[in-house]
């Protein structure tokens, strides 16, 4: 029988690993995260700094901060028995009044703080200024990227600076370093996009491109239409063209918007008006007996009973 034993000489200086760290995090932690955590257990956190840990393992300081955020944030969601996080860590430095003044001497930082106040609709507090400076200075986000971050968070109802900082850290961990990176990561796709794709019959694995997203964004944001009206336009598009065409659907919806359509009942009224006008134009004009023969000859191709479609039923089936 094969036996496994522990060397007693290595068991004297023991490390106690909290149970919630074992249960919730060890399985998900990578090598560097595990090594840094064991380092903190052995040497403690009193004299440990990001730079000292980085030097010990020959890691970059960003790698160390990312590992510490893993234990603090990801595993901090699971509290230990005494209510604390696995690792208490904040990468945000404390900015003194003099340091803040040095930053605000920069034109792009002054403009950034002004934009932040415009977005928030109020003067921002000193601790909120520190958060912005942390994102700008420590995370290395340019002023244009920080401005986009503020716009993105506030438009998604994340108005606290704690939430804004969390999103900034997530972007940093995801490799976002430029405005273009952020736009690719957060490209806004209207919630109606999937329903439009299905209504038009796009393949399930179709990934909408920016031009297609722009159509749906125009219908929902500029025209203010919901899926009751958009879905009707999609159904008519498929019925008329036999293929998914956002451009054709856009033509229908633009026409309805120009005609002041606001609800499905307006579409019915518009259809009825269109039908009446067509009937009026198709009514035969009075003709002399002399022209009866010519009329009869010209109309010989219409000697059949025209089909009558129940468009309401067809639209219902299409939807």
Image (cartoon, rainbow, N blue to C red):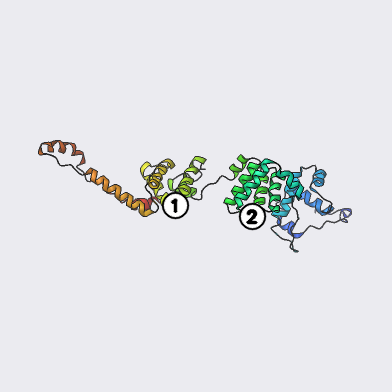
* Residue at the far left in the pictured view: 289
Neighbourhood count class around disc 2 (C-alpha, 10 Å): few under 14, some 14–19, many 20 upward: few
Left or right for 192, reference 76: left
Please state if 260 lies on the left or on the right of 35 as rendered: left
Expressed as whole percent of the image width and height from the top left, the position of residue 57 reads 80, 44
Check residue 227 in the rendering and tell me which mark sits there, or answer none.
Answer: 1
Q: Which residue is rendered at x = 24% and y = 43% of the image?
A: 281
Question: Is residue 153 left or right of 90 when viewed as pictured?
Answer: left
Please indicate, yes or no, whether residue 306 appears anywhere in the rendered image: no
Give the CA distance from mark 2 to mark 1: 32 Å
Please report the residue visible at 45 percent of the width from the left and 47 percent of the height from the top: 219
Q: Nearer the viewer, residue 149 or 40?
A: 149
Label 2: element kind = loop
Q: Circle 1: is it few (<14), some (14-19), or many (20+) Cα within 10 Å? A: some
Question: How far from the left and from the top, in percent, is residue 211?
Answer: 49, 40
Residue 298 can be seen in this image: yes
Q: Secondary structure at mark 1?
A: helix
**Residue 13 occupies which quadrant of the picture?**
bottom right
Task: State the count of labels.
Answer: 2
Residue that carries the numbered disc 2 in the rendered image? 160
Give the mark nearer the N terminus: 2 vs 1.
2
The quarter of the picture where the N terminus appears is: bottom right
* Residue 301 x %, y %: 21, 39
Residue 27 percent coordinates (x, y): 71, 53
Q: Which mark is residue 315?
A: none
Q: Nearer the viewer, mark 2 or mark 1?
A: 2
Label 2 with label 1: CB-CB less than 8 Å: no
């Amino acid at each position: 029988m094969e036996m496994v034993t522990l060397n007693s000489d290595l068991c004297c200086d023991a490390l106690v690993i909290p149970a919630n760290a074992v249960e919730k995090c060890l399985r998900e932690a990578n090598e560097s995260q595990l090594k840094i955590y064991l380092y903190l257990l052995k040497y403690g956190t009193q004299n440990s700094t990001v730079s000292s840990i980085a030097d010990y393992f020959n890691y970059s300081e960003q790698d160390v901060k990312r590992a510490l955020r893993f234990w603090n944030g990801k595993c901090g969601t699971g509290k230990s028995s005494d209510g604390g996080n696995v690792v208490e860590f904040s990468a945000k430095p404390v900015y003194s009044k003099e340091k803040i003044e040095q930053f605000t001497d920069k034109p792009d930082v002054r403009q950034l703080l002004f934009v932040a106040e415009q977005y928030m609709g109020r003067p921002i507090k000193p601790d909120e200024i520190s958060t912005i400076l942390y994102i700008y200075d420590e995370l290395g986000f340019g002023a244009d990227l920080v401005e986009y971050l503020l716009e993105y968070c506030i438009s998604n109802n994340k108005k606290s600076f704690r939430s804004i900082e969390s999103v900034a850290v997530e972007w940093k961990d995801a490799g976002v370093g430029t405005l273009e990176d952020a736009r690719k990561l957060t490209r806004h796709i209207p919630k109606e996009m999937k329903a439009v794709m299905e209504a038009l019959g796009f393949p399930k694995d179709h990934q909408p491109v920016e031009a297609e997203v722009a159509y749906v964004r125009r219908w929902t944001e500029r025209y203010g239409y919901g899926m009751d009206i958009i879905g009707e336009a999609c159904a008519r598009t498929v019925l008329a063209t036999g293929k998914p065409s956002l451009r054709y659907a856009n033509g229908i919806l633009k026409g309805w918007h120009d005609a002041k359509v606001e609800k499905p009942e307006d579409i019915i009224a518009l259809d009825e008006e269109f039908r009446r006008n067509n009937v009026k134009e198709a009514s035969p004009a009075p003709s002399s007996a002399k022209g009866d023969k010519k009329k009869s000859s010209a109309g010989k191709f219409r000697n059949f009973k025209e089909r009558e479609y129940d468009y309401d039923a067809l639209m219902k089936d299409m939807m």
